[in-house]
Amino acid sequence: MSGAGNSLGFRADTLAIHAGQEPDPISGAVMTPIVLASTFAQDGPAVMRGPYDYSRAGNPTRTALEQCLAALEGATHGIAFGSGCAAMTAVLMTLKSGDHVLVGDDVYGGTFRIFDKVMKQFGLDATFMDMSDPAKVREAIRPNTRMIWVETPSNPMLKVFDIAALAEVAKKARLTLVVDNTFATPMLQRPLDLGATAVVHSTTKYLNGHSDVVGGAALTSDKELAEKLHFLQKAVGGVPSPFDCYMVLRGLKTLGVRIRQHVQSAKVLVDLLSRHKQVARVFYPGLESHPGHAIAARQMKGFGGMISFDLRVGDKGTAPSAAFLKALRVFTCAESLGGVESLAELPAIMTHASLTPEARQAAGIGDGLIRLSVGLEDIEDLEEDLDRGFRAAEAAL
Ligand code: P1T
């Protein structure tokens, strides 16, 4: 399978294992070699021997990863970065001072921080808004708006937005639509097929899947945008190491089976949480009561492995939620998500602490909001662990 592998029509589970990866032409090694070289011999000054001259500009292990990710997202171009934040920043650096971006009102805290604390200094303006009503998004477009940016499902409230409808709005106004597909992964949702211009990922999460890499990527079939991103990758230099690229390639091989199990286990825990007297509300797109359920059912192949819920905390602030998290023995209290191990966290003081208190309140991120990344442990151990948490939370009330 050569190049992006995509044109050959293979399906996602096959692409995840083979796209961008041929047995090594010299040794026949089945696994992609980790090419650690920072520089590559030239046949003479500025006479390239092969496609590579310097590893910031390009590296064979990185190319394999970029082609694999591009194939999975149905993109012609993949551009890998040293973190999800580096990938997102590069995409925003394709804009210029005075431009304006419409951003979904529920995004990872670090994404909010890039807009609020970094890009703002360079004159990039952003409006955070609920993107549930595409007509409202259309009305919010200004003469200087260049981009619509959305996470779906979103972090941490699991909001779902209609990618095809937003793509329609973007297309009519000649805007770029960027979708952060970290929570869904291409196994469950392919935004480019629905009309998005680009997809961004934190490969740190499900794509790598083993909580041992920080990485990111942007995928697009827009040639002009891809050229700008390749330029920024080389010029600004937020590149991943060859070893990290290899690790993500290795993790990707099991993405399909992992995601199917994450989804199946999440469903069991959602049922448990939905029936629990200490839970005020469960946020999960698979619930029929979820406002975005119909859209999720249409645009996703499964509802994902992330769950948020509001624990009843009375007037005790974060104490019952903290007690819940401390009592867990299978779930680890930690930021991040998408690994084989289950994680639990308190967005208000962890992943979304960088939001302003007003932004947190507007998003609904309160003291009782607990976010779970459902891992691959035995489901009965996970159920018992949540019981442990609930008992500790009750004692703290
Ligand atoms: O951590 P990094 O690889 O830089 O990725 C940033 C990022 C981008 N997009 C989404 C949707 C994310 O969730 C993240 C990182 N999120 C966490 C660390 C977290 O615990 O939510």
Image (tube, rainbow, N blue to C red):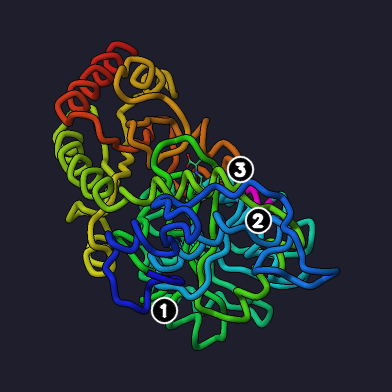
Dominant SS type (magenta): helix
**In the image, which disc is placed on residue 115?**
2
Of residues 380 and 124, which is closer to you in this image?
380
Q: Which residue is mark 1?
A: 195
Q: Kindly identify the residue that appears in the image at 58 percent across and 43 percent down.
A: 355
Q: Is mark 1 within 8 Å of ligand 1?
A: no
Reply above or below: 185 against 135: above
Q: Is mark 2 within 8 Å of ligand 1?
A: no
Q: Tell which residue pokes out farthest to the front in this image.
A: 26
Q: Kindly identify the residue that appears in the image at 39 percent across and 64 percent down.
A: 19
**In the image, which disc is placed on residue 356?**
3
Of residues 57 and 89, which is closer to you in this image?
57
Q: Tell which residue pokes out farthest to the bottom in this image.
A: 172
Callout 3 secondary element: loop
Q: Quadrant of residue 333?
A: top left
Q: Quadrant of residue 232?
A: bottom right
Return the disc, 3 or 2, that comes first in the chain's sequence.
Answer: 2
CA distance separating discs 2 and 1: 24 Å
Reply above or below: 229 against 247: below
Q: Residues within 10 Å of mark 2 (few under 14, many from 20)?
A: many
What amino acid is labelled 3 in the image?
Thr
What amino acid is labelled 1 in the image?
Gly
Q: Which residues are magenta?
A: 112-116
